[in-house]
Image (cartoon, helix red, strand yellow):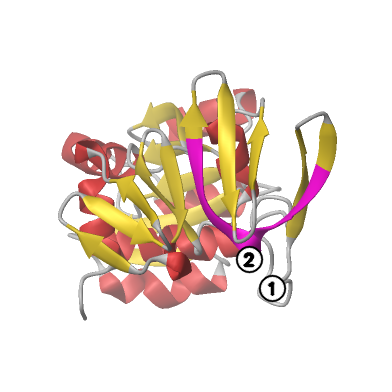
């Protein structure tokens, strides 16, 4: 998913970029510091998601939205809650009030992914969503409900299911794009887990059935935020 940040505050760019680095399916294509820069970028680049500030010099973020014919997904990031109603009237995906936590950012991203193309994130009614995967000289239909976790293994990827394990030439990043973001989590550069299959967390490892999956240092924050008690 290609995203850009439109905000006149450099620190806001750094915070959002830092959060986005934890989600491997996001790819930044530009930073814009006013609406005119944004218009130029959007005219020249395909953008799937915009992180949009409201108060900016000369023209506001909402002025920009009103000029876009086919608007990408939009997450508003603003220090002013009084604009929230107008934002939702413009069909934004979510409205983040600055300063916002990584946990709140993840909730906003889940809303975006829930409304994406079904091949990337199945709709709620498609609980038995599936995709086809080549492995072992066969083509397997993989039901996402059956996945325990996925492991990158050299030039291959291991998909651990409830009753079997399939080895495929697909990259782990390609498989991650096929999984609903609300149900799966990257916990290591080599591991993606089904969050509802977690049995327990033991120090730096996650137990799923009889398997122990390591937690990468750079992914630890994701896990703490998702499973932190309200």
- Is residue 74 placed above or below 123 in the rendered structure? above
Which residue is labeled 1 in the image?
Answer: 127
Which residue is labeled 2 in the image?
Answer: 145
Residue at 60%, 61% in the rendered image = 162
Residue at 19%, 39% in the rendered image = 217
Residue 70 at x, y percent in the picture: 70, 48
Q: Secondary structure at mark 1?
A: loop
Left or right, 189 with reference to 124: left
Left or right, 163 with reference to 96: right
Dot 2, crowdedness within 10 Å: few (<14), some or many (≥20)? some
Residue 28 at x, y percent in the picture: 44, 30
**Residue 224 in view here:** yes
Residue 136 at x, y percent in the picture: 76, 31
- 6 and 131: which one is in front? 131
Q: Which residues are magenta?
A: 140-151
Dot 1, crowdedness within 10 Å: few (<14), some or many (≥20)? few
Residue 155 at x, y percent in the picture: 56, 18
Magenta part, dominant SS: strand
First reached walking from the N terminus: tag 2 or tag 1: 1
């Amino acid at each position: 998913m290609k995203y850009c940040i439109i905000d006149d505050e450099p620190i806001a760019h750094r915070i959002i970029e830092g959060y986005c680095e934890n989600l491997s399916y996001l790819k930044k294509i530009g930073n814009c510091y006013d609406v005119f820069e944004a218009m130029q970028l959007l005219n020249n680049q395909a953008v799937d998601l915009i992180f949009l500030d409201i108060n900016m010099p000369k023209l506001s973020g909402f002025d920009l939205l009103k000029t876009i014919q086919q608007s990408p997904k939009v997450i508003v990031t603003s220090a002013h809650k009084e604009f929230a109603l107008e934002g939702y009237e413009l069909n934004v995906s979510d409205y983040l009030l600055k300063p916002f936590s990584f946990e709140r950012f993840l909730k906003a991203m889940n809303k975006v992914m829930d409304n994406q193309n079904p091949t990337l994130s199945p709709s709620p009614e498609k609980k038995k969503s599936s995709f086809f995967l080549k492995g072992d000289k066969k083509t397997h239909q993989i039901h996402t409900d059956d996945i325990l976790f996925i492991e990158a293994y050299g030039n291959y990827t291991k998909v651990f299911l409830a009753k079997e394990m399939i080895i495929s030439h697909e990259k782990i990043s390609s498989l991650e794009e096929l999984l609903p973001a609300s149900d799966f989590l990257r916990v290591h550069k080599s591991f993606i887990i089904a969050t509802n299959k977690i049995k327990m967390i033991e120090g730096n490892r996650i137990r799923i059935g009889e398997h122990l999956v390591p937690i990468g240092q750079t992914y630890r924050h994701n896990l703490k935020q998702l499973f932190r008690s309200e």
